[in-house]
Image (spheres, rainbow, N blue to C red):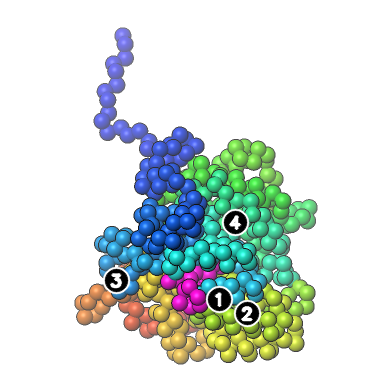
Amino acid sequence: MSTPARPANRHHKRPRGEGQWALGYREPLNKNEENKKNDDGLNVRQRIIDVYSKRGFDSIDPADLRGRFRWFGLYTQRKPGIDGGKTAILEPEELDDRYFMLRVRIDGGQLSLEQLRVIADISNTYARGTADITDRQNIQLHWIEIEAVPHIWARLEAVGLSTTEACGDTPRVILGCPLAGIDADEVIDGTPQIREVNERYIGDQAFSNLPRKFKTAIGGCPAHCTVHEINDVAFVGVVNERGEPGFDVWVGGGLSTNPMFAKRLGAFVRPEQVHEVWAGVCGIFRDYGYRRLRHRARIKFLVNDWGAEKFRQVLETEYLKYALPDGPAPETPRGGRRDHVGVHPQRDGNFYVGFAPRVGRVDGDTLHRIADIAERHGSTRVRTTVEQKMVVLDVAPDQVDSIVRDLEAADLRVTPSTFRRQTMACTGIEFCKLAIVETKGTASGLIEELERRLPDFAEPLTINVNGCPNSCARIQVADIGLKGQLVVNDKGEQVEGYQIHLGGSVGLNPSFGRKVRGLKATAEELPDYVERVVRNFEKQRNNGETFSE
Ligand code: SF4
């Protein structure tokens, strides 16, 4: 007797492909993928030079304007005067201004004074004096006109800087410890590896069509300042059992929606292998990464589905073609803060001096002033940090008091309050098309108010302010994370405000902040709210307990 045919189950669904190239899904599954397939993002550079900068804004192909321009760090700014309530309901072109934000990538945060002065000049000449230090060590300029872009590139490139792959579905700027090569306690200097990955792969079409952005950190900082927990791939300095310094690899960290901490692969990478391991991890992302839905197109989703063991096995067998040895986990991070603010000794007997501009906002004149101050005190190089701060290196002991005085006089605080030191803010509604609320001004006002109300508060406390549900200012890992949204005030009006997340952290015991249900504050109520939280924390904390505990 033959087995009856199984009735067709109309509800049985075949597993749906996620658009992974390695599984044969080469046909684009959405508009973004189609644009990337039609023409590589890197090809837009020549069109900007030959066509758009000559014929002006209206000549720009929309697929370049809203897509490929990002491959060179260019985003249209938000048209002024459009309130946050319109962000989600207007078409992208209705939000577009005719000016651009331009992101200058500063790999490892490393700048010579010459480079700093070039950025300062560009800011004053082409960007109405704007300059924001980002939490990925970049400097962002605003009000850029398309006609100016080739001139800006020429000036940046003449001093070894670039905007290539500063945005877009590409390997973005590589984070590095600002103290690489000078810190007495560093495990290993990651500078040669940052340089090598940059020189080999940035601007290479082998890695210029990724499912989405890809963030890298390489550092041997004992304070783990490059926040490896929230990067797509991170190399963290370790010493193996034979006493050789190298790197421990982490993959799949990221915030935004569905925040996830990176996972350790447990493999030891020798310094000379870093570039090929980087290329392997980035290659896995390119080939196996999910491309169907933009919000699932980060490597963290793949790592989460595969697990660290399978990820390492695919890396070794399909990409490296050799096995990596097991290696140790990084040491417990050195105590204290990761921002490198203040005066501290270098291993050569000189000092580094870290300072805190207000929420990363500087301007062309201030950048010039920083270069002049550094030069007057015998330094030739500065660094940006991943906390929107800067550091002057190589200050001789007899110059320290004077440089501190000069920086402080320029409102660049070397001994800032906790609030100035640990408050970060993203770009917000002033320039960002996704923003719902203002951020930089609100955060600056909050700092001032808290300094006035709580002058003696000196405990570490991070306050991160975002203008929308994305996480450019890392709200989920702040002690107090403020996610911009419209809220209703006590008069029943819709006004700018924030959803509160409490108790997030990176470091020893990383955790995501808890979204306190229903807990929102209007921008106006913010100082009262934060003051209350801080006073309660001071009252209720046990000895030595930090805010996130
Ligand atoms: Fe823009 Fe939102 Fe990012 Fe802030 S968090 S810069 S508002 S996308």
Residue for badge 2 = 371
Q: Nearer the viewer, residue 98 or 363?
A: 98
- Chain-order first, disc 4 or disc 2: 4
From mark 2 to mark 1, how far is it between C-alphas?
9 Å
Q: Quadrant of residue 383?
A: bottom right
Q: Nearer the viewer, mark 4 or mark 2?
A: 2
Q: Which numbered disc covers residue 234? A: 4
Q: Is residue 310 above or below residue 403?
A: above
- At numbered mark 3, what does the secondary structure look like: helix, strand or loop? loop
Q: In the image, 347: left or right of 476?
A: right
Magenta segment: 124-143
Q: Amino acid at mark 4?
A: Ala
SS for callout 2: helix
**In the rendering, at what x and y percent does residue 512 appear?**
46, 63
Mark-to-mark CA distance, 2 and 3: 37 Å
Does the residue tagged 1 have its C-beta within 8 Å of any atom of ligand 1?
A: no
Type of amino acid at the residue the image marks with label 2: Ala
Q: Is residue 501 magenta?
A: no
Find disc 1 in the rendering and name its residue: 120
* Residue that label 3 marks: 82
* Residue drawn at 47 percent across, 47 percent down: 40
